[in-house]
Amino acid sequence: MPTIETVPSFSGGVWSSLDATAYEEVFNPSTGTVIARTPLASAGQTAEVVEAAARALPGWSATPVVERARVMFRFRALMEQHFDEIAALVTREHGKTLTEARAEVNRGVEMVEFSCGIPSLIIGDMLPNIAAGVDAQCVRHPVGVCVGITPYNFPNMVPLWMFPVAITCGNTFVLKPSEKVPLSAVRLGELLAEAGLPAGVFNIVHGGKECVDALLTHPKVSAVSFVGSTPIAEYIYKTGTAHGKRVQAAGGAKNHLIIMPDADLDRTVKQLAASAYGCAGQRCMAGSLAVAVGSAGDPMVEALVDLGAAMKVGPSDGDESVAMGPVIRAEHRTRVATALENAKKDGATLALDGRERGMTDDAFLIGPSVVDHVTPEMRIASDEVFGPVLSVARVKNLEEALALGDACDYGNGAVIFTRDGYAAREFTRHFNAGMIGVNVGVPAPMAWFPFTGWNRSFFGDLHVQGTEGIQFYTRQKVTLTRWPRTDESHLDPVWRDAPRQ
Ligand code: NAD
C-alpha cells in the first residue's frame, strides 16, 4: 500500500504536517481512490495560525499598496505558467472535466487581475475647504486578519474570490479550504510564496467544525468570508457577527430557468443542459428548476431527454472526451439518487433517470436526470439537490413563473429564455434573485461585478467580487484638517494679506 500524503498546513511561511487527532480522506472522484488525507486542526492549532497572520499584519499593512499589487502581478504570471497543472489538480481532487476546471481557473485568474489594479481601486476621496479652512479626506484602511472558509465545488476559484483582494488591501489572511478538496489551496499557497509574498501574509489551516469555530471566535480575526451551504452560511454569519467580526456568507441556491414559448428551442435546450449538468450540477449557479411557460414544456422535455441520454458520462481525470464527470463522493451520489426517488414518490415523472448510468462504477458517477411535472409542494421543487438533475415545472404564463420565484427561499440566479423584449424586461425587473440572465444559461458575474445572492443565498451586506469586495476588506477613515494661521511674519505681505479659503 502506498503511503497516503497528509495535506500540509501553511503558517507564518512554514509548511508542516499537523499532528491531528482526526483526518478526512481526499478522493479522486474519477477512480474512487484516496489520494491524500486532510488533518482536522484543533482549536489550539487553529489559534496558532491566526497568531502567525496577526504577527505579519503590521509589516504587510505598512507595505506600499503598489508593492502589494506587484506581488499579485507575479502571482498572476505564475498561475499562467502553471495553468494546465493547476486545472488538472482541480479535476483530480474534484472530478469536474478538464474543460470545466480550466474555466474555473480562468475565473480565478480574473480575480487576481482585478486585484492587480488595487492602487487605482482603493484610492481615497478628498474635498478641500469643506468648511472654512477645513479639508476633508476619506481613505481606506485594512481591517486586519481576514479568514476565508470555502466549499468543495470550486477548490481554486472560490479561495481566489477572497484572498487576492483581502491581501492587496493590506490585510493578512487565513484560508480554511474544504477538507474534501484541500490540494488546490496548497498549490495556490506555494505559488504565492514563489511570487514573493512575505511569510505570514497568507496562511492555510485545515479542519472541520472545531477549526471553524476557533476562527469565528478568535479575538484577532476581524473579517470572515464564507461560501458553502445555506445552513452553515447562516451559522457562520450569526456566530461571526456575535463575536464582532464583519461577515459575508454566501449559501446555497435553487436557480429557476424560465422558458417562454417563443424561445429558440435548440439553443435553449443546449444551454439548459450546460447549466444543469455542467460540473455534474455542483454549482451554486446551476440551473435547477426549469419553468416551462405555456406550450414550451413538451418539446423542451423531449429534446432535453435526448440530449442528456447522449451525453458522455465517465471518469473525467485523463479523458477529455467526457462531457460530465463524477460527483464529489459516493455518499453524495446516494444523496442525489435519494432526491430522485423522493421526487418519484411525491408524484413527479422521471423522464430521464440518471441512476441508470454509472451508479455501480468505482468513479462516483450518476447520469443526468430530467424530472418532469414538478409541482411546488414536492421536495425537489425547493431543495437544493446539487447534482445533475433538472426539474421541470409547467406554468401558464410569466406571472406564474415570477410567483414561483417569489415563493423560493433562495435567490442566487435566474434566467429567462425568450425572443420577447417585454417578457425579458419584466423578468429582469421583477424576478426575486440577485443574478439574472437573459438567454445566458449561467449568469455568474465575473471578477469586476459583485456576486449578488439574495434571500437565503446570502447573509451579510457586502458580497465577494467587484468593488463590494474592496469595501468588505477595508474600513474607511475620514480626516478633517484645519491649519490655522500662526506666525506669518516670514510671509511676503502681498501673499499674507490676500483673501484665503
Ligand atoms: P458546506 O457548507 O458543507 O461546507 C463549506 C465549508 O464549511 C467547508 O469549508 C466546511 O469545512 C465548512 N463546514 C461544514 N460544516 C460545518 C459546520 N457544521 N460548522 C462549521 N463549518 C462547517 O458546503 P459544500 O458542500 O462544501 O459546498 C456546496 C454548497 O456550497 C452548496 O450549497 C452550494 O450552493 C454552495 N455554494 C455557494 C456559492 C455561492 O456563491 N452562493 C458558491 C459555491 C458553492
Image (cartoon, rainbow, N blue to C red):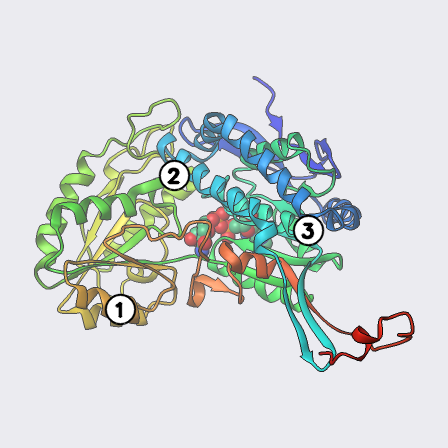
Compare residues 188 and 6 and report the one nearer the observer: 188
Q: Quick one: SS at disc 2?
A: loop
| Kind of residue sitting beneath label 2 | Val
Q: Quick one: SS at disc 3?
A: loop
Q: Residue at x 80, y 75 (%)?
A: 494
Identify the residue position indicated by label 1 in the image: 404
Q: Quick one: SS at disc 1?
A: helix
Q: Is residue 77 above or below residue 257?
A: above
- Going from the N terminus, do you reach mark 3 or mark 1 first? 3
Compare residues 277 and 12 and report the one nearer the observer: 12
Disc 3 crowd, CA 10 A, few/some/many (<14, 14-19, 20+): many
Compare residues 142 and 337 and report the one nearer the observer: 142
Horizontal relation, residue 318 to residue 20: left or right: left
Tag in front: 1 or 2 = 1
- In x, y percent, where is residue 463? 51, 60
- In x, y percent, where is residue 137? 68, 68
| Kind of residue sitting beneath label 1 | Leu
Q: Find residue 307 and report its image quarter.
A: top left
Identify the residue position indicated by label 2 in the image: 327
Give the number of the disc on residue 170. Answer: 3
Q: Find residue 159 and report its image quarter.
A: top right
Compare residues 493 and 109 and report the one nearer the observer: 493
Q: Is mark 1 within 8 Å of ligand 1?
A: no
Q: Do callouts 1 and 2 mark residues in contact (Cβ within 8 Å)? A: no
Q: Is residue 473 above or below residue 336?
A: below
The reply to whether residue 131 is visible in this rendering is yes
Mark 1 to mark 2: distance in Å? 28 Å
Mark 3 to mark 2: distance in Å? 37 Å
Disc 1 crowd, CA 10 A, few/some/many (<14, 14-19, 20+): some
- Going from the N terminus, do you reach mark 1 or mark 2 first? 2
